[in-house]
Image (cartoon, rainbow, N blue to C red):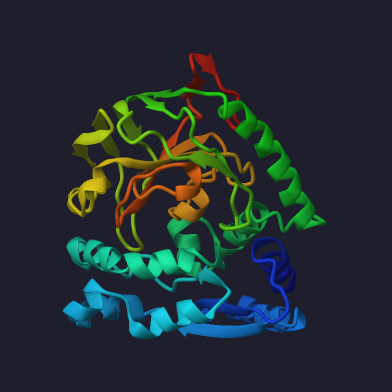
Amino acid sequence: MIDPNRFAALLCDWCLEVAPGQVVLVGSTRLAEPLLDALYAAILDRDAWPVMEMDSPAWNAAFYAHARDRHLDGPSPGDLAVAEAIDARVRIDAPSNAAALAEVDPSKIVRFARGQVGLREQMMAKRWAGTLWPTPSLAQLAGMSEAHYEAFVERALFLDHEDPVAAWRALAARQAELVARLTQARTVRIEAEGTDLTLDVSGRTWINSDGRRNMPSGEVFTGPHESSANGTIHFTVPTGPPGLRVSGVRLQFQDGKVVQARADEGQDYLDATLATDPGARFLGEIGIGTNTGIDRATGKILLDEKMAGTVHLALGRSYPESGGVNESAVHWDLVCDLRQGGRITMDGEPLAVPGV
């Protein structure tokens, strides 16, 4: 079983670097109670202020059933006040039903995301981390027994190491070498069955994502030049918002813009997302997964995009620290598995990445 005290220490000391006097917002559902209890104590032990935010697993679906226009089109004043008051936050995904939003109109989900842009930007300006706690629902989504899934998550978090922080430092060092190689690149090409896509990344900043924000992490990423994507890509790992399965997405790009989009499942959500705003049809990110503790898709993008041997692209918003300038209410990561004959080349030369 995952030791919640070791997990809480990893979040406090590696991800958030909690300091005396800080106000730290912790949010999840009651299913993450062991970790919530451990975090409450750990934050106090570091002479900081914990603010605990408990959600009901039923509230997400209830929100879309009862929300009025004001709720869909703008952030809550209370949430804005909290965002102003805190120094750091951690969100722990612990759903009771991974398909809770299956019957929600996809256009409502997209509309709400658009209305939250201001709050999201304010929250992301603070120190933040996102993680998950194993639940029966997540195990079922991954197609694993609860015990198997918990052990899988423990490995992904490096909590199976004697010193998890040292393990994350080691991953950061390995990824720094990959970043150094990619920083020299002008053109990145992704090739796999049904995929042949080129991107210009010259002059952009590659980010070493080493668990400081997402936990687990294990990726390097940047923002490609917005008008540079040309070709096609087949995303072989299903992704989508909670409760909505979107699979078999095939996108064709011309001068950076999605000009054709098909999905085996979830076409309505794909269409609604691309229609969110002008930036939704352009790429905000290319990322390469490196976490060898994640060896299979689980249905959770937090895990799946970090899987060694994969590459992911995000439609929509760029991360400014990468040099990307695409603006959108959308940031949707889509994953392509390269482990069965795919490859990434950098200015024509094969790029050695974990898992490929």
Q: Residue furthest top?
A: 348
Left or right: 208 in relation to 238: right
Asked if residue 169 can be seen in this view, the reply is: yes
In the rendered image, residue 20, in percent from the top left (x then y), is placed at 73, 79
Quadrant for the C terminus in the image: top right
In the rendered image, residue 69, in percent from the top left (x then y), is placed at 17, 78
Quadrant for the N terminus in the image: bottom right
Report the residue at 67% width, 37% height from top.
176
Q: Nearer the viewer, residue 8 or 212?
A: 212
Q: Is residue 38 above or below residue 339?
A: below
Asked if residue 1 can be seen in this view, the reply is: no
Numbered-mark total: 0
Report the residue at 79% width, 52% height from top.
166
Q: Is residue 19 above or below residue 264?
A: below
Quadrant location of residue 66? bottom left
Q: Is residue 302 above or below residue 114?
A: above
Left or right: 248 in relation to 217: left
Quadrant location of residue 254? top left
Report the residue at 31% width, 54% height from top.
330
Report the residue at 28% width, 32% height from top.
256
Q: Nearer the viewer, residue 330 or 355?
A: 330
Quadrant location of residue 177? top right
In the rendered image, residue 189, in percent from the top left (x then y), is placed at 43, 23
Left or right: 197 in relation to 298: left
Q: Residue furthest right?
A: 162
In the rendered image, residue 347, in percent from the top left (x then y), is placed at 49, 17
Q: Nearer the viewer, residue 274 or 80?
A: 80
